[in-house]
Amino acid sequence: MEKNEACDLSVIVVTYNLADLLLRCLNSVASQSGVCYETIVVDNASTDNTVDLLQRYAREIKLITNEKNAGFARANNQAIKLSKGKYIYFLNPDAEVHAGAFEKIFRFMQDHPGVGIAGTRIVNPDGSPQSSVEEKYPGQRHATEELQNLKGEIAWVLGASMVARQNTIQALNGFDERFFLYAEDIDLCLRTRKQGWIIGYIPDAVITHWGGQSEQEKPPSEVWGKKLAAELAFFQKHYTQSTLRSVARSNILQAYWRIFSLKTTIPFLKNKETALKKLEKYQLTLHTFRDKNA
């Protein structure tokens, strides 16, 4: 396809230091048929051989190379500006698309005009199901007033494999760039529903997802800290101060209980490593929400 030509599907892949998995991902994309699609890859200043690898695909993809890590939301927005597809398919670099997925994604969106965003079925490398569809938002039981009158049963779908209408994305001005990594998919889906769209699910379009690969070298506490920060940003954006205080109190009480339980049982465990990691996680949760609830 010519790079300025309109198409059915714009495939956007944002990558960071995942050269080996990215190669598998792009090969699976290249094997798709049945629809007209373009592929846009954004490299977020990888320090491995990602850019060299992508040069092999120079004729098949549009490539954006950032001089520094712009974050997932901003990098996707860069690619959205170049996209020509009727639908935009956001795909993680640590994912492999199964045969026929693009055709099934396109057909589903064509057949369901009320769906603004949809997720696909996601499986682990061993074939077991991976959680990719959620019916509730974080802290939803405290936010009944803010989340009234939303259409559909699905709250959000995992951004590792997510398709959106081009006009929906344009109306929402893309991803909220305050979310550097994590929760940007939750935020986008909620904003989509607030505009009157439904979130859909495409069970016969399947991808294998390795998951968390770009963060695997980071300490678990650092990754959990990023997830907490993103979740807190979501609460602050969409929930009232009263609801935010309720969410904070609930997390604080749960953290105190978990910390107490773990400290009580850890001395009697033979393998303490997993329990100590959980303890660190709940101590970080306590610190985060106690500060915000002060």
Image (cartoon, rainbow, N blue to C red):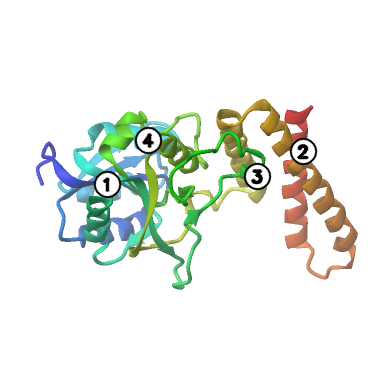
Given contact means CB atoms under 8 Å apart, are the residues at marks 3 and 1 in contact?
A: no
Residue 9 in the image: state x and y as whole percent. 22, 47
Q: Which residue is mark 1?
A: 113
For marks 2 and 3, give the one nearer the viewer.
Answer: 3
Residue at 60% x, 46% y is 223
As shown in the figure, which amino acid type bears the numbered disc 3? Arg
Q: Please give left or right for residue 243 compared with residue 121 in the image.
A: right
Residue 7 in the image: state x and y as whole percent. 15, 45
Q: Dot 4: few (<14), some (14–19), or many (≥20) neighbours within 10 Å? A: many
Q: Dot 2: few (<14), some (14–19), or many (≥20) neighbours within 10 Å? A: some
Q: CA distance from mark 1 to mark 2?
A: 40 Å
Given contact means CB atoms under 8 Å apart, are the residues at marks 1 and 2 in contact?
A: no
Given contact means CB atoms under 8 Å apart, are the residues at marks 2 and 4 in contact?
A: no
As shown in the figure, which amino acid type bears the numbered disc 2? Arg
As shown in the figure, which amino acid type bears the numbered disc 1? Pro
For marks 1 and 2, give the one nearer the viewer.
Answer: 1
Q: CA distance from mark 1 to mark 4?
A: 27 Å
